[in-house]
Image (spheres, grey):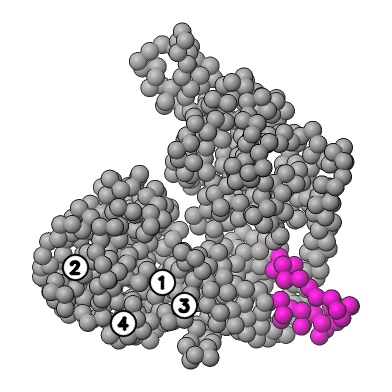
């Protein structure tokens, strides 16, 4: 990482095509034009600065959110090239105004290990901004160039001074014609840059919010060891964090650098967070497979060597060994062997990465077990307990699978589920409804063809405080698993899901909110793929019904109601629960795809979401109190995508 790469100058910049396509189809380049897409612009520029750090240049990045919701990002790298390019314009113009230009296209370019989008990022940010201004500190000089209207208006580059530092400052303001929101989230940016600071030891990232004079600085000298400690804060740990820091030479003589931090806790959940070239691989891939294989082989070999396994043919299952595991895996892979699966960089496909992590994990973890016998014994005994719980879960699962051949009277969900008539699983919707009263109204209101109703009569268990065996003993959870039909935990298969949407529909009160949280905790822990696929929703019933003669208006917020009352007098009905609505009202306001409002549950940052669930739903009271006191803004639009009407579904 500290080895400085050569060749990053004017001659290393290549041009492939222009910019207009980005504004026409921004989703192809940044995924979406909502809050997520807006912040993707920030990640692109920050990642460019981090690429400089990975190449061995600079150790500081500063991010400033300005009062007008423009943003300024500075690094202390080499400074982007600015002299005249072979195309006849400044190299800065090539980088920021020509698509697919940059220094990341070949092994002889400016970067051998990079997390950026091969130079596309800077031009995409420019294309989607009202303005972008780049200031370059290089060769003892300061140059500046400004672009406006998505890069269509280009000002000449100008020399504005001298300097004794190097680096690049990029100041831009997203175009409100492109994005549905242009308000940056301090917390979202904070989570992302804290993650980057953890991954690169000694990197200092400063975040300043000029809107409220808030400032935070992130710098971790122990890198991913501190990341694991952060993730396990408040948990009972089994061992001190163990760090593997090594490299693997591939058959093609490329070198893969591998950092792995491992710690076990007394929790039931496994948590592996992986990165490649500082980019989060949310869907795992070959490197995570290698890590799991190495841990499993090392633990089983140790257990067999010291007679922990009485049956010589018995092996501890990998999932049992990893119960309570927290691991951060960070690889740096040369561009020429870097492979991802699919359009996004969410899943690593590089075969050599599997071999590297498998071999290194097995070698180092075997030594660690030998040198820490007490820890090894604890992990093996913990695995045996997990195995027994898994066997019990399998029996329950087999019972559910075999129930299809039984008569209706023998199936536990008889009398609960009102099924949809259609066999088109993707179009079918499952409503999880609070209580029998609301369930009865929902059954009357539903579209029988595509909507199924499952009333929840008992209390849903808190999955964060329970193991798999305990969760399966909860009748409501068991019924939900059976109804969705895609299994759960490691065996969950989204292709088998009976529904394209699972919609939680509860009363708009504290009890209803509690049921929502318990169900979301279950889905996050035991069916996370359902959330990742965008199939989990929360229904939003209205709070008020306003009536004046034959005119009826439904309001979802107090502010919305007050706006109507300013212009006219209405009779006000406050809905305290779903059961207060007749089935026509429930259909029109909450279930009809043409007029309802749904909140789609998304996971933007798995690690951040995981930690919040642990804090809010776990056993520790103090972290929960601190979190609640520190976060008082619970506006729905800040945390969720709102889907109103069929056109947005």
Q: Position of residue 253 (x, y in %)?
A: 48, 91
**Front position in the image: 596 or 92:** 596
Q: Residues within 10 Å of mark 3 (few under 14, many from 20)?
A: some
Residue drawn 30% across the image and 52% down it: 24
Q: Which mark is residue 50?
A: none
Tag 4 near tag 2, CB within 8 Å: no
Instruction: Check if residue 235 falls in the magenta segment.
Output: no
User: From the viewer's perspective, is the residue at label 1 or at label 4 nearer?
Assistant: 4
Residue underneath mark 2: 93
N-terminal of the pair, mark 1 or mark 4, is 4
Q: Which residues are magenta?
A: 295-323
N-terminal of the pair, mark 3 or mark 1, is 1
Q: Residues within 10 Å of mark 4 (few under 14, many from 20)?
A: some
Q: Position of residue 17 (x, y in %)?
A: 26, 67
Residue underneath mark 4: 109
Q: Residues within 10 Å of mark 2 (few under 14, many from 20)?
A: many
Quarter in which the N terminus is drawn? bottom left
Q: Which mark is residue 115?
A: 1
Q: Position of residue 590 (x, y in %)?
A: 55, 29
């Amino acid at each position: 990482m500290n080895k400085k790469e050569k060749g990053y100058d004017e001659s290393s910049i290549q041009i492939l095509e222009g910019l207009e396509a980005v504004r026409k189809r921004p989703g192809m380049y940044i995924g979406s034009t909502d809050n997520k897409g807006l912040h993707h612009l920030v990640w692109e520029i920050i990642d460019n600065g981090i690429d400089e750090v990975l190449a061995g240049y600079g150790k500081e990045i500063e991010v400033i959110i300005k009062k007008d919701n423009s943003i300024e990002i500075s690094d202390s790298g080499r400074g982007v090239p600015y002299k005249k390019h072979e195309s006849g314009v400044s190299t800065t113009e090539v980088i920021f105004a020509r698509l697919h230009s940059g220094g990341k296209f070949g092994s002889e370019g400016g970067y051998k290990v990079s997390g950026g989008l091969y130079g596309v990022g800077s031009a995409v940010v420019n294309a989607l901004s009202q303005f972008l201004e780049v200031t370059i500190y290089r060769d003892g000089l300061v140059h500046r160039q400004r672009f406006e209207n998505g890069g269509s208006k280009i000002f000449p580059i100008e020399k504005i001074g001298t300097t004794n530092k190097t680096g690049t400052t990029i100041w831009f303001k997203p175009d409100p014609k492109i994005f549905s929101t242009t308000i940056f989230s301090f917390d979202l940016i904070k989570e992302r840059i804290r993650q980057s600071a953890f991954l690169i030891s000694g990197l200092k990232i400063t975040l300043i919010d000029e809107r409220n004079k808030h400032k935070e600085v992130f710098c971790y000298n122990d890198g991913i060891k501190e990341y694991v400690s952060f993730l396990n804060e408040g948990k009972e740990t089994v061992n001190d964090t163990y760090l593997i820091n090594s490299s693997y030479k591939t058959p093609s003589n490329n070198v893969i650098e591998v950092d792995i931090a491992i710690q076990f806790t007394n929790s039931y959940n496994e948590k592996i967070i992986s990165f490649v070239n500082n980019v989060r691989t949310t869907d795992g891939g070959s490197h995570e497979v290698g890590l799991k294989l190495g841990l499993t082989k090392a633990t089983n070999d140790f257990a067999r060597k010291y007679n922990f396994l009485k049956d010589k043919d018995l092996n501890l299952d990998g999932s049992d060994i990893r119960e309570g595991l927290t691991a951060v895996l960070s690889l740096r892979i040369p561009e020429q062997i870097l492979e991802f699966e699919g359009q996004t960089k969410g899943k690593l496909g590089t075969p050599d990465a599997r071999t590297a992590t498998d071999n290194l994990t097995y070698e180092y973890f075997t030594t660690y077990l030998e040198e820490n016998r007490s820890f090894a014994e604890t992990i093996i005994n913990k695995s045996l307990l997990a195995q027994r719980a898994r066997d019990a879960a399998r029996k329950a699962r087999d019972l559910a699978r075999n129930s299809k051949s039984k008569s209706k009277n023998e199936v536990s969900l008889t009398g609960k589920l009102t099924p949809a008539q259609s066999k088109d699983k993707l179009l079918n919707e499952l409503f999880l409804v609070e209580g029998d009263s609301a369930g009865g109204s929902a059954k009357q209101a539903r579209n029988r063809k595509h909507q199924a109703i499952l009333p929840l009569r008992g209390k849903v268990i808190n999955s964060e405080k329970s193991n798999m065996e305990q969760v399966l003993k909860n009748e409501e959870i068991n019924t939900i698993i059976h109804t969705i039909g895609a299994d759960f935990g490691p065996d969950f298969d989204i292709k088998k899901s009976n529904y394209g949407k699972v919609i939680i529909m509860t009363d708009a009160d504290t009890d209803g909110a509690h049921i929502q949280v318990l169900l979301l905790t279950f889905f996050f822990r035991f069916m996370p793929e359902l959330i990742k696929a965008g199939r989990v929703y929360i229904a939003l019933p209205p709070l008020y019904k306003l009536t004046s003669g034959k005119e009826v208006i439904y309001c979802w917020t107090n502010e919305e109601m007050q706006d109507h009352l300013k212009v006219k007098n209405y009779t006000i009905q406050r809905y305290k629960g779903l059961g207060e609505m007749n089935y026509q009202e429930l259909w029109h306001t909450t279930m009809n795809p043409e007029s309802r409002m749904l909140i789609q549950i998304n996971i933007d940052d798995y690690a951040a979401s995981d930690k919040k669930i642990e804090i809010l739903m776990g056993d520790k009271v103090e972290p929960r109190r601190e979190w609640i006191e520190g976060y008082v803004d619970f506006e729905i639009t800040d945390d969720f995508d709102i889907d109103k009407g069929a056109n947005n579904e």
